[in-house]
Amino acid sequence: MIAIGCDHAATDYKKKIESHLNGRGIAFEDFGAGESDCCDYPEYAEKVADAVKSGRCEKGILICGTGIGMCIAANKVRGIRCALCHDVFSAKACRLHNDANVLALGQRTMGIENVLEIVDAFLDTSFSEEERHVRRLGGIADIERRNS
Ligand code: RB5
């Protein structure tokens, strides 16, 4: 199950990503926002991040104008590793190296074809499990512990 959320700047891309996921037979849960809502992105970032943190959803996708606000907000939730990706290479690398569990995207900064390719790369790539990457994720978790 994929958690998906956006703010008012990205409802169009959220719909397009959902339709793409439907076409691939990938289940998702939509945490808003709806089309008529003018809203603040932290609320939706936290909903999606909580769904991933709790295990209710395996991964999350967040879209706002630039993806930046969503990425910053989602990364405040313990255990969330959110990556803002503008290219397929980064989308693969954030899974292989960083075990990113949330993907952030920007409707105002990215073309939809690129976005859908990035979504596929993010969903279809597994964490490498290599020792050096596991060690570095441990380092990130240590920072979280020192700051909670
Ligand atoms: C909303 O205007 C915009 O600030 C938001 O979508 C996002 O780009 C923030 O990072």
Image: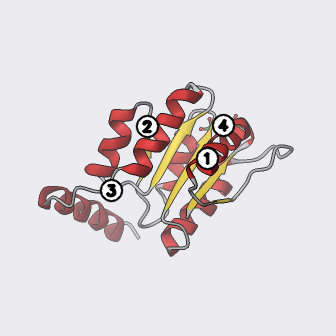
Q: Quadrant of the N terminus?
A: bottom right
Helix, strand or loop at label 3? It is: loop
Q: Nearer the viewer, mark 1 or mark 4?
A: 1
Amino acid type assigned to the residue bearing label 2 in the image: Cys
Amino acid type assigned to the residue bearing label 3 in the image: Asp
Mark nearer the N terminus (4 vs 2): 4
Q: CB under 8 Å between callouts 3 and 2? A: no
How much space separates mark 1 and mark 4, taking CA atoms?
15 Å
Instruction: Judge: label 1 CB < 8 Å from ligand 1.
Output: no
| Residue 23 disc label | 1
Q: CB under 8 Å between callouts 1 and 3? A: no
Mark nearer the N terminus (3 vs 2): 2
How much space separates mark 3 and mark 2, taking CA atoms?
14 Å
Helix, strand or loop at label 2? It is: loop
143 to the left or right of 102: left
Mark nearer the N terminus (2 vs 1): 1
Ligand 1 found in image quarter: top right
Amino acid type assigned to the residue bearing label 4 in the image: Tyr
Q: What x and y, as percent, mark residue 127? A: 28, 57
Mark nearer the N terminus (1 vs 4): 4
How much space separates mark 2 and mark 1, taking CA atoms?
22 Å
Helix, strand or loop at label 1? It is: helix
Q: Nearer the viewer, mark 2 or mark 1?
A: 1
How much space separates mark 3 and mark 4, taking CA atoms?
24 Å
